[in-house]
Amino acid sequence: MKITYICLLALLSKVSPSFAAEYSKLVPEKSVISFTYEQMGVSMTGSFDKFDGQIMFDTASPEQAKVNLEVDMASVNTGSSENDTEVSGKDWFDTQSFPKAYFKITKVSHLDENLYQIEGDLTIKGITRPLKAPVRYTPKANSGVFEGTFTLKRQDYAIGQGEWSSFDVVANDISINVRIYALATN
Amino acid sequence: MTTASYGYNATAKTLHWLIATIMLGLIGLGFYMHNLPISPGKLKMYSWHKWAGVTVFLLATVRLAWRTLYPPPKLPSEMSKLLKMAAYYCHVSLYFLMFAIPLSGWLMSSAKGFKTVWFGVLPLPDLLHPNRQLGEALFNLHLTLNVILIMLLFAHVAAVLKHHIIDRDEVLSRMLPISIHHNHRRTKS
């Protein structure tokens, strides 16, 4: 009888998305961190292909959530190896001195059914600044996807200094899209 | 026959010299910027190069339409059949390159993952998906077409100088903004 009940519960948790779910395993291979920026008025896209992180997120108590991300800056992929080398340099990410970017969530609030507001600290190139962004949660069978987009000013993080510091070639606004795929705790 | 009937009309002349100027600038800029290390200046030059290239394509379209409406003056009757044929194929090739070079550049840009946005305002559709190998192949095509263009331009200029200096006919003067005539030919009736 108890087994039947557990089976039924498991089935329900798969079928009904509004059912409370807990996530504790981030799957980097299925997650994406990409960015979009304007160069000479042309929209360009790139990504960071290597990153890892921890997630503790319970839809029943989102305010308790703990999320950390660590991005390997050397994994930047702009679609051109010449550009990848350039952005790793001192004027941009200075990857040698600052190999990783960090994001740590400090506060999560429930906005709407599957919409949350996250607040946290983003550290790039050793500079930490607060960040606030809406995140959409999509429950799936045994997993969940958390997706959020925010815009940062590259100047705030000293990204693109020296001859790149004016915004006529590369715009100040960089849009970051983060899509986290996490496994549900059984 | 008066000399006026030899000449190209003002629009044809304007298009010829405008396209010639832009294309020469583009050839110089293209070879120069290609070897530069990445910098804001280089990215600006690439954008300008693309904008000017799209402009050449559009001007060439107008020019071809104009040429259809107002056929160019005939070649001097003294020319041999062989030279007339050489002139014809040289001109056909030049027209072909006015379209093919910008087109190959646009396709290369798409294949390399850089969208072309004319003057930073009008985005051109990407006809190809980003593909490194295809990008390299299109770069080689763009370069080869330009090398052919340079050779044809030498032939074009050499031919026009031959007409002017050796044949002493009106072939050069009829395309010049201000006519210069050979005195001994002016009285030709």
Image: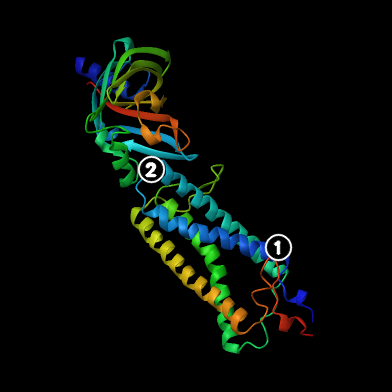
Viewer-proximal residue, B171 or A47?
B171
Question: Image quarter for residue A92?
Answer: top left
What count of labels does the image hold? 2
Residue A25 at what x, y percent from top left? 23, 24
What element does badge 2 sit on? Answer: loop
Task: Give the side of residue A54 with respect to residue B106, left or right.
Answer: left
| Res A19 visible | no
- Quadrant holding the C terminus of chain A: top left
Q: Give the residue type at disc 1.
A: Thr
Residue lying at 42% horizontally and 58% vertically, measured from the top left: B31
Q: Chain of mark 2?
A: B
Q: Position of residue A156 (x, y in %)?
A: 38, 23
| Residue located beneath label 1 in the image | B11
The image quarter in which residue A128 lies = top left
> Where residue B179 sits: x, y (%)?
71, 70
Q: Which mark is residue A69?
A: none
Q: Earlier in the sequence, mark 2 or mark 1?
A: 1
Q: With respect to residue B74, does A68 lie above or below?
A: above
Say if mark 2 contacts mark 1, CB within 8 Å. no
Residue A137: image location, x then y, percent: 37, 23
